[in-house]
Amino acid sequence: MKSGYHGLEALWHDLFWEAEEAPGELLLIDDYLQDKDGKSLYVGSGSGRLLGPLVEAGHELTGLELSSEMAALSRERHPSAEVIEEAWQEHEGRYSSILIPAFTFQLFPDPQKQLQRLREQTDHLYLTLFFPWAELSGDLPQNQWYFDRGIQLPTGEEGELETRHRIKEQTGSLVRKHRYTMRSRSGEIVRQEETEQRLRFFTDVALKNLLKKTGWAVKKEIYNLGDGEEDDLIYVSTLHLTAHEIPT
């Protein structure tokens, strides 16, 4: 079974981001890289939506992408940005910093093992995580399909995204199924595909313990991608991490 984004999920990924009009990470990453000398690695660089502009801005940055379809889109749209098509767990190399934005880290099955391996490859890590408040609070119905969002496709058809999830709070596990439907202008289904994601999420205490155990210290933390007030509910945390000695 293939991993990564494929089919409609790959083709529509950027369209859904643009339609959502939510705060993005481009400026946050650009600022983070300002004092980083040498090559950095962007894990899960996707279609190049962020990688391309960052390389074009002069940053020495290489993308790493598991999905062949997303890597192809990146090379087509941003030919100046290098993309390596490979799973991060199989990739070797030492970098000035490693970037894992857009919740990609939460798709990794063994976070402790991955953080330990990351420490061998860099001393500086940029990491963005989300906490599923809506799912945990019951604002979103569990184990049933619900409409997530829709887009108008450039070809005139309608694109729909439905989501179904189940959550295991005790183990910090969230399984989300996505159903992508393309409809003709008359409303008939032209194409439909389903995908599944398994994500890990962490309470603040559990995350801090995990980082300490694997040799990472929080240098800076940005809440909700820098958007909103200080007392807002924190649904996204962006961490600037530096390597430190693991306590014995």
Image (cartoon, grey):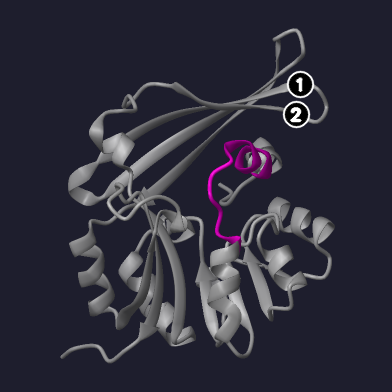
Residue at x 47%, y 72% (from the top left corner): 126
Q: Which residue is mark 2?
A: 153
Q: Is residue 15 magenta?
A: yes
The quadrant in which residue 186 appears is top right
Q: Residue 217: x, y in percent?
A: 31, 80
**Number of numbered discs:** 2
Residue at x 49%, y 85% (from the top left corner): 121
Say whether residue 82 is visible: no
Question: Are dots 1 and 2 in contact, CB under 8 Å?
Answer: yes
Mark 2 neighbour class, 10 Å CA radius: few under 14, some 14 to 19, many 20 or more: some
Q: Nearer the viewer, residue 55 or 76?
A: 55
| 170 left or right, relative to 103 | left
Please tell me whether the stretch drawn in magenta is mainly helix, strand or loop: helix
Residue at x 31%, y 55% (from the top left corner): 230
Q: Which residue is mark 1?
A: 157
Q: Is residue 1 magenta?
A: no
Q: Nearer the viewer, residue 91 or 36?
A: 36
Mark number for residue 169?
none
Please tell me whether residue 181 is drawn above or below residue 30 in the rendered image.
Answer: above
| 100 left or right, relative to 207 | right
Please tell me whether residue 14 is drawn above or below residue 122 in the rendered image.
Answer: above
Say whether residue 41 is visible: yes
Magenta-tinted stretch: 14-26
Tell me the element at label 1: loop
Tell me the element at label 2: loop
Quadrant location, the C terminus = bottom left
Please tell me whether residue 138 is drawn above or below residue 34 in the rendered image.
Answer: above
Look at label 1 and name its amino acid. Answer: Glu
Look at label 2 and name its amino acid. Answer: Leu
Q: Nearer the viewer, residue 180 or 137?
A: 137
Please tell me whether residue 66 is drawn above or below residue 143 in the rendered image.
Answer: below
